[in-house]
Image (cartoon, rainbow, N blue to C red):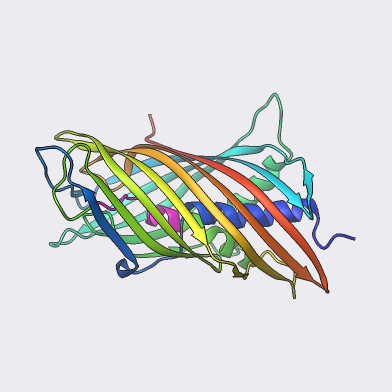
């Protein structure tokens, strides 16, 4: 008899991996290092975000995921995961004299975008899982270079503790949506590296992202990004595990790339596309029995402004 059913494995892997590839728990700026690799072409100027206090804007985040799962060496067909669309309302509350931006955000609406010609059995499961997020709010303080200094979240009453822990990563991704830029002036072709130690759902990992300035004008700029994550073997304390069960990560490798367009008047991208692939191997031990899980996950995330 299996310790966990296929559906239980899928939901646990979904919560673990979506938060892993997207975000991390709040960390101090000291945990993040921005290193200039090349200043790029002349002319060179500093990049700084300059939103105005009191401005309100909306952004739509659409996420698609494909996943392959193998349990104890046996591969199982994975149901198609429908896209999830999140409408976020962002309000800039204050811009300090040093440039720090304090803002609040709210999940104004959430949709599961299923294919009517080929409905996914996961669509109602995902909608029930995500519906409690509607109306959830958070706040953050971000420097004018895009470094998150503080973030917190307020979930709706009645949200199950295990779902709250699972959704923490997704909520925190909003607080870290800006792309950190270097202190130094840069021009087109300029490159910089961001290195940070992250923690998500009890997992500690190292993330390195490399950015390049592709375009810049008086209104904003565009960048490309490459990202890689690695984690050492460790115990992972997931709230989705059965009581008494232990989960250990054996290996994790994540890489991805994306493009983003920003306006100087907003800390949120006006448009962004990213694709991230992750391979993970884990074991779960419960009641003296052990199962081995291997997953291949690809997540595509698109940001755009409402028409």
Q: 46 left or right of 228?
A: left
**The image quarter in which residue 251 lies:** bottom right
Residue 80 spot, x, y in % from top left: 68, 37
Q: Residue at x 65, y 54 (%)?
A: 13
Q: Residue at x 31, y 50 (%)?
A: 179
Q: 79 left or right of 179?
A: right
- The mark tally for this picture is 0
Q: 282 left or right of 96?
A: right
Main secondary structure of the magenta stretch: loop
**As drawn, which residue projects farthest toward the top?**
117
Vertically, is 178 above or below 115?
below
Q: Quadrant of the C terminus?
A: top left
Q: 39 left or right of 178?
A: left
Residue 104 spot, x, y in % from top left: 34, 56
Q: Residue at x 63, y 67 (%)?
A: 238
Q: Is residue 97 visible?
A: yes
**As drawn, which residue projects farthest toward the right?**
1
Q: Is residue 136 visible?
A: no
Q: Which residues are magenta?
A: 172-181
Q: Nearer the viewer, residue 281 or 260?
A: 281
Whether residue 41 is in magenta: the answer is no
**As drawn, which residue projects farthest toward the front?**
37
Q: Nearer the viewer, residue 172 or 67?
A: 67
Q: Residue at x 73, y 66 (%)?
A: 284
Vertically, is 71 above or below 164?
above
Vertically, is 195 above or below 214?
below
Residue 158 spot, x, y in % from top left: 60, 64
Residue 82 spot, x, y in % from top left: 63, 37
Q: Quadrant of the N terminus?
A: bottom right
């Amino acid at each position: 008899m299996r310790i966990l059913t296929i559906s239980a494995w899928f939901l646990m892997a979904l919560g673990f991996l979506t938060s892993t590839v997207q975000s991390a728990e709040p960390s101090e700026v000291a945990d993040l290092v921005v290193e200039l690799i090349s200043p790029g072409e002349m002319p060179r100027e500093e990049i700084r975000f300059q939103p105005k206090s009191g401005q309100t804007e909306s952004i739509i985040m659409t996420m698609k995921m494909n996943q392959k799962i193998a349990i104890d060496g046996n591969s199982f067909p994975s149901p198609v995961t429908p896209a999830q669309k999140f409408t976020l309302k962002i309000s800039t509350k204050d811009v300090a004299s040093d440039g720090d931006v304090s803002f609040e955000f709210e999940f104004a609406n959430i949709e599961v975008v299923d294919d009517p010609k080929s409905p996914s059995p996961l669509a109602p499961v995902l909608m029930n899982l995500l519906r409690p997020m509607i109306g959830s709010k958070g706040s953050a303080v971000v420097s004018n270079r895009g470094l998150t200094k503080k973030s917190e979240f307020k979930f709706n009453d009645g949200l199950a503790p295990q779902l709250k822990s699972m959704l923490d990563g997704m909520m925190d991704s909003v607080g870290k949506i800006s792309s950190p830029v270097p202190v130094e002036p840069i021009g087109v072709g300029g490159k910089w590296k961001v290195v940070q130690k992250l923690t998500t759902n009890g997992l500690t990992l190292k993330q390195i992202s490399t950015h390049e300035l592709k375009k810049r004008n008086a209104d904003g700029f565009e960048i490309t990004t490459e990202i890689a994550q690695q984690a050492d073997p460790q115990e992972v304390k997931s709230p989705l595990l059965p009581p008494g069960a232990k989960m250990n990560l054996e290996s994790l490798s994540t890489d991805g790339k994306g493009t983003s367009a920003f306006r100087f008047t907003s800390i949120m991208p006006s448009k962004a596309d990213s694709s991230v692939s992750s391979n993970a191997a884990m074991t779960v031990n419960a009641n003296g029995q052990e199962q081995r899980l291997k997953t291949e996950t690809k997540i595509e995330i698109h940001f755009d402004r409402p028409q």
